[in-house]
Amino acid sequence: MPMPVDKVSLPVTPPIRILVVDDSAVIRGLITRWLGESGGFEVVGSAGNGRVAVESVERLKPDIVLLDLEMPEMDGLTALPLLLKVQPSAKIIVISTLTQRNAEISLKCLSLGAVDYLPKPESSRVAGALADFQHDLVQKLRALGATKTRHVKPPAAPPASQSAPLKMPPVRPKCLVIGASTGGPRAIERVLSDLGDAAASLPILIVQHMPPMFTAVFAEHLQSLLSLPAREGRDGDALSPGTILVAPGGRHMGLAVINGKPVIRLDDGAPENFCRPAVDVLFRDAAAVFGASALAIILTGMGSDGTHGARALAQSGSTILAQDEMTSIVWGMPGSVSRAGLARETLPLEALGPLVKSIIKKPV
């Protein structure tokens, strides 16, 4: 007679609770259907304007709010701080049509506490845009839903490192390269602000996963914030100390050497890690062009973009720093680099800028 087999109760992961806020009933219906079909999500409610959304958040306690910008009665920008006041743990993704004005408002929302943004497909766009929007939305929601909610006030000063002091690079850095995705704009702002006058000592190249138009607005925002020249990189641009070049949305930004000098190289090659621009492209080229004199930072973001490029940087002797899990919105990209053993240090966001400043300014 066979022995009875004990039934093992596996833990059940609760679904990610979503509130959909959009003045279009069609969009609300589409998103609700997509998430129902995807599994792992529960749309706990919907709202047609910001006022109703604020009332709903307090009652429904969603994990994530999908927030449209353009709505009657109360728009998304007005509703955002009210939503976070009522439900501080909620993660808010801004969704808007792709215009310069909405790009500017979306970046403003990020500064106010939204964690990510997603452009809506336009009806005039090519077939497949709706499917791409659905795919990107589900991926972002899964990545954000898998992370622990963090609302820890950063310390006034960077905490003392628990590891041995960082051994300074053997050569002075000649270029700073930064890669980021989800949560990246605020993280990049923090790191560069903490550099102070050291930011003027070397060229700064950034790949932030963003759609076209957003990257130009982001560069303008950095210029205003830091009082340093900042713009989208252009093919053939020479690198200048104190100038910030942001990879344009939809194009890879790498480096080449022409007449003995490093210049920006843009191309429309296939996406890498489903990304264009890809951090891997910039990091890989920085390793080839600058070798050990490249200094790299990998910040918050979903996926693993940047890991292959970080491997090339490490092999060339470059110093790579990664943001830690606790201060990352999504510890995908920095986590991948850190777990691969490629990061010289994995540190809280507030510690990265001061460390980079000391690396740049320390005599070698």
Image (cartoon, grey):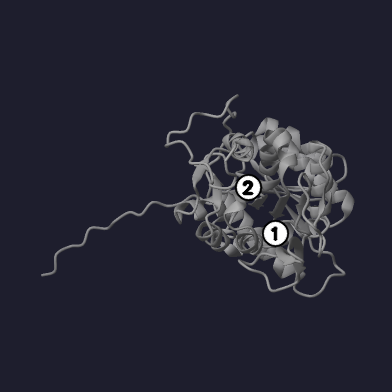
Label 1 element class: helix
Q: Nearer the viewer, residue 253 or 28?
A: 253
Q: Which mark is residue 173?
A: 2
Is residue 218 among what the camera can see? yes
Residue 110 is situated, as x and y percent measured from the top left of the image, at 73, 42
Callout 2, which amino acid? Pro
Who's the residue at 66% across and 39% down the image?
Answer: 191
Of discs 2 and 1, which sits in the foreground?
A: 2
**Location of residue 199 by image quarter:** top right
Who's the residue at 71% across and 63% down the image?
Answer: 255
Q: Which mark is residue 31?
A: 1
Left or right relative to 272: residue 128: right
Residue pushed farthest top? Answer: 156
Residue 187 is situated, as x and y percent measured from the top left of the image, at 66, 42
Label 2 element class: loop
Is residue 42 among what the camera can see? no
Q: Nearer the viewer, residue 142 or 177?
A: 177
Rate crowding at label 2 as few (under 14), some (14 to 19) or many (20 or more) other CA atoms within 10 Å.
many
Left or right relative to 324: residue 245: right
Q: Which mark is residue 322?
A: none
Left or right relative to 9: residue 129: right
Q: Nearer the viewer, residue 304 or 309?
A: 309
**Which quadrant of the figure contains the N terminus?**
bottom left
Callout 1, which amino acid? Ile
Cα separation, mark 2 vs mark 1, equals: 47 Å
Residue 15 is situated, as x and y percent measured from the top left of the image, at 53, 52
Rate crowding at label 1 as few (under 14), some (14 to 19) or many (20 or more) other CA atoms within 10 Å.
some
**Which quadrant of the figure contains the C terminus?**
top right
Q: Choose the circle earlier in sequence order: 2 or 1.
A: 1
Who's the residue at 68% across and 43% down the image?
Answer: 188
